[in-house]
Image (tube, coloured by chain):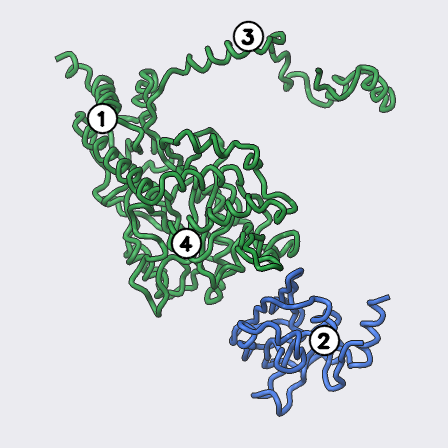
Amino acid sequence: MAFIPHTSDDIARMLEVIGVRSIDELFDEIPRELRAGALGVPPAMSEMEIARLLSERAASDGRSLNFIGAGAYEHHIPAPVWAIATRGEFYSAYTPYQAEASQGTLQLIYEFQSMICALTGMEVSNASLYDGASALAEACLMAVRANRAASSRRILVPRAVNPTYAQVARSIAGHQGIAFETVDFDRAAGRTLLESLQPYGGQDITALVIQQPNFFGSLEEVDRLTDWAHENKILLIAVVNPTSLALLKAPGQWGAGIDGIHGADIVCGEGQPLGVPLAAGGPYFGFMATRMQYVRQMPGRIVGRTVDAEGRPGFSLTLQAREQHIRRSKATSNICTNQGLMVTAATIYMSLLGAAGLERVAAASLQRTADLVAALCKVAGVKPAFNAPRFHEAVLILDRPVAPVLAALARRGIFGGLDLADRYPELGHALLVCATETKLQADIDSYAGALTDIMNPSRVAA
Amino acid sequence: MSNIPSDLRYTKSHEWVRPAHGEVPDGAVEIGITDHAQSALGDLVFVEVPQAGRAVKAGEASAVVESVKAASDVYSPVSGNVIAGNGALATQPELVNQDPYGSGWLFRVQTNAPIDAAALMNAAEYANYVAEEAK
């Protein structure tokens, strides 16, 4: 069966009606030198032939060892996660338009929201957002609506926040009257210092963004920073890694409390570590949670539990007057998607692992990264950049430019980390590395051996 | 036919204004939505009122009323400083449905300029306006 909607007769008749001789003539506007030319697509192959070709191509990629994190993390995904998520009952990427007809989908989202609330220590979660970076942008827009004490629309973004997130927040929210102000980090600890925030004390500021762990993998002093924000009537937006929350204090508990207010006000982050495989460009998913007092300012869908006319429990979308099908241009967000399928996988992942399982993943990742840093810092010319406690990422400083070293590692099948030269030139030859529970001691030894070989070949020979 | 008290002034966006007099503290004007508006919205589930101290301009969206099927902005008919929002509505939004001209008031404004009476309708004019809108 050919999946071509128009016969050649159809096409000829359409061309005749609009008065051109060929489809190519429609592209005459495009100068010839700008056209792609022949694409060199080979003739059609049978299913058996194409399956063989693609498995050969896949095998030619080799089995690489990945030590890059920087916002997307390689974790083991138990086989049942996607076996269950891709069942027909779940395999739909959207909340259906007649949402309440799909009670199973709504129940799953409700359970996802409950799990996000449990992880973050917050009161209410939405059904997910597009990804972690756009979740931060949405959190910034939400903070402007929620913080009635501030009218400035100024938001403080430390440089230790993932620079891609900061860039996406600027792209989405920067044209809506929000001014982003950059706060530097401490060169020794690799974290945001209270002292660098204090010049903003007493000023009209809408929100402070704190990422925990931050982009460098360092742990921020979230209690002090949260209390400082609340002392100054600034909302605290927490960007968190969900895996890390199995070990670290929940954002809802940050700070000693100022005037009875304690904990982050808005929590957001990237959900990919929860059962979503690494893929260039996603799909991933963002999550967001807040206090009940700000729920009407939160974007995204929210599923609530209720009872039907006969008193039986059921689920429904709730607080929809925030959304664009009702509030139009004044909706809390006009990016109204959620990532239903990714959320399905994440909910199954969290259910299968449970709190104890997630804690083991987090603890193993922390330990592996500590092992990795120790092993790599034994290589001459490598040292840690920062001395703050960390989770499962760390910045290393090399005695030479990072890019050629990473290229040499890649030739050996090792993705050695992210070169920070472009984003943080002041750090010198800085490399961001990550190890999760997927890395065995043998993998770490392979990396350290290859790095020694590349950086100090004479030592290997000796 | 909805209730349209004769002592109030009305806007085309269905707010009412109670001019300053003894019943409202500090000589402020009181603002709410009309019986017709609450009836059109249906049962309110949430009302957001402006905080005291906020400066509002005539025509500025200053409050939000939300029912199960719609959410609408409420525009201040006058310019001035908000001296009070009706805090009772936070837990009892239904007061707007039950008593739109009384306990369901939304906010009070200390005006800083004479009210532009020409921009507001009296009860008879508003009744005509509602009738025209319905056609």
Q: Which residue is mark 1?
A: A441
What's the mark number on residue A49? 3
Q: Is the C terminus of chain B in the top left, top right, bottom left or bottom right quadrant?
A: bottom right
Of residues A263 and A75, the one nearer the viewer is A75
- Residue at 61% of width from left, 81% of height from top? B103
Is residue B55 rendered to the left or right of residue A374?
Answer: right
Residues behind callouts 2 and 1 on a single chain: no
Q: Secondary structure at mark 1?
A: helix
What's the mark number on residue A48? none
- Residue at 31% of width from left, 16% of height from top? A412
Q: Position of residue A192 (x, y in %)?
A: 30, 50
Q: Residues within 10 Å of mark 4 (few under 14, many from 20)?
A: many
Between marks 3 and 2 in the image, the one whose residue lies nearer the viewer: 3
Q: Secondary structure at mark 2?
A: helix
Residues behind callouts 1 and 4 on a single chain: yes
Q: Which residue is mark 2?
A: B35
- Upstream in the sequence, badge 3 or badge 4? 3
Q: Position of residue A74 (x, y in %)?
A: 37, 31
As measured in the structure, the alpha-carbon distance from the residue carrying label 1 to the one carrying label 4 is: 36 Å
- Residue at 54% of width from left, 79% of height from top? B84
Q: Which residue is mark 4?
A: A237
Q: Give the residue furthest to the left.
A: A462
Q: At label 3, which amino acid type do we have?
A: Glu
Q: Residues within 10 Å of mark 1 (few under 14, many from 20)?
A: few
As measured in the structure, the alpha-carbon distance from the residue carrying label 3 to the one carrying label 2 is: 73 Å
Instruction: Please give the letter of the chain rendered in blue.
Output: B
Q: Which shade of the palette goes to chain A?
A: green
Q: Position of residue A439 (x, y in %)?
A: 29, 28
